[in-house]
Image: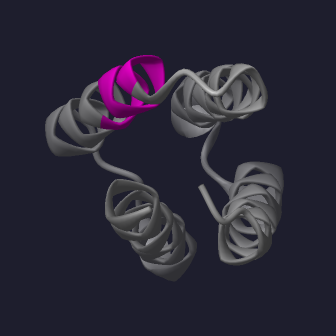
Amino acid sequence: MALSPVVDLMQQYRDRLDAAASQCPEAERTLYALHRNALGELEEALARGSRPEVLRILATERRAFGWSFLSGTAGGEVEGAFASLATELKRT
C-alpha cells in the first residue's frame, strides 16, 4: 500500500477535524471526538497492515457520517476530507 498520498490525506482530515471541533456547537463535540477516535483506530490498522480492519473502519465511519450531521462549512469540509481519504484507501 503506497502511503504517501494516504499520509497527506490523513493529515488533512485530522486538521479539518481539529479545526471544526474547536469551533463547533457544544452538541456536536461528541461527534467530532468519535470521528477523531476512529481516525486513531484507522492509523493503527494501517500501521499493522490490516486491510480488512481498514475497510471495516471506513464502512463504520461512512455510516456514522450518514447518521449524524456536522453543521456549517467546517462540517462539510470534514466530511469531504474523510471522503477523499476513504477513496484513496479503497484504491490502494
The residue lying at 29 percent from left, 48 percent from top is: 69
Q: Is residue 50 above or below residue 26?
A: above
Of residue 69 and residue 65, the one placed in the foreground of this image is 65
Q: Position of residue 32 (x, y in %)?
A: 61, 37
**Residue 30, located in which quarter of the rendered image?**
top right
Residue 55 located within the stretch drawn in magenta: yes
The residue lying at 40 percent from left, 58 percent from top is: 86
Q: Position of residue 11 (x, y in %)?
A: 81, 65
Q: Position of residue 82 (x, y in %)?
A: 47, 60
Count of marks overlaid on the render: 0
The residue lying at 62 percent from left, 30 percent from top is: 42
Residue 51 located within the stretch drawn in magenta: no
* Direction from residue 9 to residue 60 in the image, left or right: left
* Direction from residue 74 to residue 92 in the image, left or right: left
Of residue 16 and residue 42, the one placed in the foreground of this image is 42
* Direction from residue 65 to residue 80 in the image, left or right: right
**Residue 58, located in which quarter of the rendered image?**
top left
**Residue 18, located in which quarter of the rendered image?**
bottom right
The residue lying at 36 percent from left, 21 percent from top is: 52
* Direction from residue 3 to residue 22 in the image, left or right: right
Q: Position of residue 67 (x, y in %)?
A: 17, 33
Quarter of the rendering occupied by the C terminus: bottom left
The scheme the figure's colours follow is one colour
Q: Is residue 9 above or below residue 86?
A: below
Q: Is residue 28 above or below residue 17?
A: above
- Start-end of magenta stretch: 52-58
- The dominant secondary structure in magenta is helix
Quarter of the rendering occupied by the N terminus: bottom right
